[in-house]
Image (cartoon, rainbow, N blue to C red):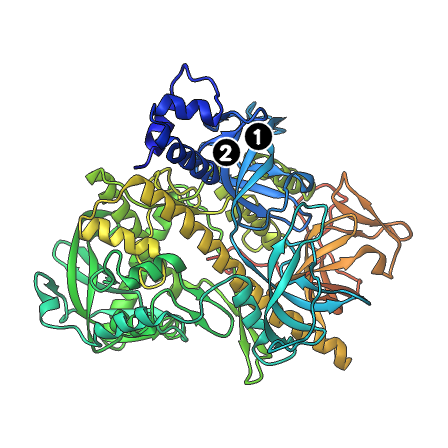
Amino acid sequence: MTYEKQLIRFMSRKKYVPLCAQEIAAHITSEGSEFKEVRRDLRGLLRAGRIVKLPDKRLALPKEEDHVVGRIIMNRRGGGRVITNDINKSAIEISSNSALTAMHNDRVLVLVERKISTQRSDEMSAKVKSRLRGKVVKILERARTQIVGTLDKTRQLWFVVPNDPRTSHVIYLPGFRFKGKIKAKRGDKVVVEITEWPSKHNAPEGKLIEVLGSSKKLGVDVESIIRQYEISSKFPSKVLSEAKRLGVNVTERDLKGRVDCREDIVITIDPFDARDFDDAISVQRIANRRWKVWVHIADVSNYVTPNSALDKEARRRGNSTYLIDRVLPMLPEALSNELCSLKPNVDRLARSVEFTLADSGQIEKVGFHSTVICSKHRYAYEEALAILKRPATNDKERMIHNANKLAQKLRKTRFRAGALNLDMPEQKVLLDSKGQVKEVNRVENDISHQLIEEFMLMANEAVAKEIKRRKVKALHRIHEAPDHEKLDNLRAQATLMGLRAGNLANQKQAGKFLESLNGHPLEDVFRVGYLRCMKRACYSTHSIGHYGLAKKDYVHFTSPIRRYADLIVHRTVYQNQKHQSQMLEEVADHISMTERNSSDAEFDSKLVKLLAHLQRQIDEGKSETYTGLVTEVRSIGAMIDIAELGMKGLVKRLSMSDDHYHYASERGRLVGRLNGNEISPGYLMQVQIERVDLHKKQADFRVINSKFSKSKTKKRQPSHQNFSVKKNKFRQSKKTKRKRI
């Protein structure tokens, strides 16, 4: 018998006064034999953070104003912020002295110590922004049990330097000797398990679990990232067996009750190296100048049933992880790349949304169907773009042209509604056979990407509205409004640069500001700056809307092969499955964490390859020259963005040899004492690599050309503002001005 519900109910009473465990047990039961069970349940509630122990050892429920439970997001300074499931509560700032021994993504109990209120500088609003500060009082659950790092030694002690710079302590290996099967040498990548860490003032101790090999060995760099983030690279045999039993083809039994769309012109458009095709589209002209649009999504829920081995493994993984040289899928390849993938010229099951659109792009009718499709062609984005740049030659190409026209109308409508255009080019790093960087390609969000993007957004919103109409519990994709304090700082920076940003807390004014940056020398600077002000999107059981997309209701529906959230939504809408609130909350918290985890791993896998590429340049004495855009100025120097590499770096102030610079904080720039040179966001520098720090995962650059030409600015701009850019690079007529996608 469990007493957890009784205990929570008892301690929730208004008249409840904090009592010790023995007193609480006496109130719950009069049977002495059951005291042990009550106290056992109390200990369980304590471990889960559902109740707290006060300084006098009395027990109580965590109050909103003092104790909260959440996940801690660490920074490199040893502190961080705690994010809770409560959408109404701000993130709680944790200093390095108040974090105990918490590590990144740990689930912690936090005592909220005080609120800090800061008056907004924006004269258009008198709102007060409150921030919370607190301290970690208990670590409830470790996100990771093992640490990956580099083996090193002092004269007497071996230790491991963690890969993750957010883990600031080295891990000592007391009594370590190279005995038995474990053979390692200094500089090897290894896996250790922390065995003892009494306090943050003491270095943790651990034991060596596994030796991955020399960091210079092919594949060890990425393998160490996989182990660092504890992402599974292999599936359990039970999961593989279950996937194998499903077969490779759609059966006649599968077709029962489905709408047959196999005769329609259905196509997929994906990256050239994709293998898991989640989505497909079909666009048809119908009577009265209307359009029939089908968005077909792979029917994973037909094969992955609740609580099956496949389902449990997919939930545990949360999502697929796309590293620089491999994909770690959420589902076995027998499903992700075969049976569920919408490959051309084979029958596939789908969950589909049918739209009837007016010629203007306005949605007139929506239907939800279980279907069977047969894709007629698989296009890469590059192929689709080439088709859109020339006249169509067949029915499939004419459909792509029509789909693009509709997508652009949907896109304009979305931006008019307040959606923010934050699209930034991405860099795709290609490797050679040795696992070294071969080239870095810039991938623009062109009209071929937008074509698919707009239809997927439309489908996600339509499904969210259907869930709201049915009044059922579901997983929502939410995105909160940006931090007002950060927006104020960005606005102040824009004013210094002679730009009129307006009230950036107003979504439509922010959209106009971002639109006004098209073609401007500071375009990338302020787009990146605005992105930094944004909060991270996540999953929640509460539908509070998506700020960036300007949508009141939004879910993830279109990628069930690679996201567990989409699979849950499919079950909710198409199979009418009811989900308990507690279960959904646990899933939302878990998959939000796995998403952050995968995102960090993906970023690190690219970064380690780029840093190794730069280190080889130093070792070989063949440093290439790059163009760096100054995005931020600090007292230590200038942060630059290297578009050719898709990475950031630092040019230290003391390394700039053309002048003696000092930091003018009130103007947000570096000013030369001799010649009066000024370095501010927007400068273009010719730089070469100077130093690579593989532990901190950062690179320093040196300026090789500091003679900058200056762009012409508008009359309203203060005379002291100068932007250093290439001549005539951004001078364009209104007709030929490049539009940001």
Residue for point 52% across, 47% down:
514
| Residue 556 position within the rendered picture, expressed as x and y whole percent measured from the top left | 33, 52
Q: Which residue is mark 1?
A: 112
The quadrant of the picture occupied by the N terminus is: top left
| Quadrant in the rendering for residue 157 | bottom right
Along the line of sight, the residue nearer the viewer: 137 or 224: 137
Q: Which residue is mark 2?
A: 68
Q: Amino acid at mark 1?
A: Val
Compared to residue 522, the image places residue 690 above or below, namely below
Badge 2 marks a residue whose secondary structure is strand
Direction from residue 256 to residue 391 in the image, left or right: right
One can see residue 580 in this view: yes
Residue at the top extreme, as displayed? 15
Along the line of sight, the residue nearer the viewer: 113 or 370: 113
Marks 2 and 1 in Cβ contact (< 8 Å): yes
Along the line of sight, the residue nearer the viewer: 313 or 520: 313
Direction from residue 424 to residue 686 in the image, left or right: right
Q: Residues within 10 Å of mark 2 (few under 14, many from 20)?
A: many
Residue for point 69% across, 40% down:
97
| Residue 279 position within the rendered picture, expressed as x and y whole percent measured from the top left | 29, 64
Report how far apart the C-alphas of labels 2 and 1 lie in the structure.
7 Å
Q: Residues within 10 Å of mark 1 (few under 14, many from 20)?
A: many
Of the numbered discs 2 and 1, the one sitting upstream in the chain is 2
Direction from residue 654 to residue 193 in the image, left or right: left
